[in-house]
Image (cartoon, rainbow, N blue to C red):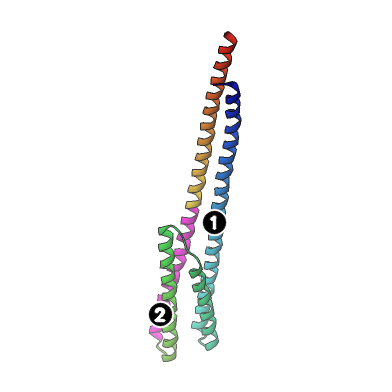
Amino acid sequence: MKPKVGLQIGAIFPVLLALLIALIFWYRYLDQRTFDNDQRFLGNAIALLNEINRATDQYVSEPSEDTRQKWQKDYEAIESHLRQREFQDFKRRLLLDKMRKHAAAIETEFNQLTDLFRMSKTEEIKTSVQAMTKHSDALNNGIFQLGQMTYAQLTSDQEESQRLIVLFIGIIALFLAGVSLALTRNLNERINL
């Protein structure tokens, strides 16, 4: 190998290493941004679910048209919030679909609850409230599981990018050592002529 070529190769590879590492950090940044957006989505979902629960308690303690309308407004907010988000991977998409079904079941139970209040069926009211609580708890659990899945994905992606960085540095170091050895051998041969 000619010394000039070896030096050029030796200069190009650190630049390639820097570009690869920059690219990995860019993907890590995008992963972190996605994670932050997911966390914001989940935090808002929890806040909206708490509003639904408060509005339900308020309606049960004081059934009126105003409290029913407040509940409906809060439900529309969480339903819209859950509809806005989509996930790429199958597990999270499936979990989000289940969460949407629980939200729809909460609305169905609330509509039954308002009918039961009009008919003054006390025992059925308790059953309906319990069913709403069950679906609310399932929705809350889904939010929690989605948060765990999102965090696990971020952690996995970060570990993978760290392994890639170490791998690239190792490959570049070995290549530079090979180029250096070839240059040294070439120079030694020329000197010994």
Q: Residue at x 43, y 83 (%)?
A: 111
Name the magenta segment's main secondary structure: helix
**According to the image, label 1 marks what residue?**
34
For disc 2, the neighbor class at 10 Å (few under 14, some 14 to 19, many from 20) is: many
Residue 83: horizontal and vertical position, in percent?
Answer: 48, 70
Let me know if residue 113 appears in the view. Answer: yes
Quadrant of the rendering where the C terminus is positioned: top right
Tell me the kind of residue under disc 2.
Ser
Q: Are marks 2 and 1 in contact (CB under 8 Å)?
A: no
Name the residue nearer the viewer: 114 or 178: 178
Residues in magenta, as a range: 122-151
Q: Is residue 116 above or below residue 30?
A: below
Q: Residues within 10 Å of mark 1 (few under 14, many from 20)?
A: some
Asked if one can make out residue 57 in the rendered structure from this viewpoint, the answer is: no
Question: Residue 17's x, y, as percent?
Answer: 57, 36
Q: Give the amino acid type for the residue marked by disc 1 in the picture.
A: Thr
Identify which residue, 63 or 29, lies in the foreground: 29
Eyeballing the image, is 1 above or below 148?
above
Q: Judge whether residue 138 is colored magenta.
A: yes
**Residue pointed to by mark 2:** 128
| Point 43% across, 57% down: residue | 89
Percent coordinates x, y for residue 126 in the rendering:
41, 81
Q: Secondary structure at mark 2?
A: helix
Which badge, 2 or 1, comes first in the chain's sequence?
1
Viewer-proximal residue among 126 and 101: 101
Residue 47: percent from the left, percent from the top? 55, 69
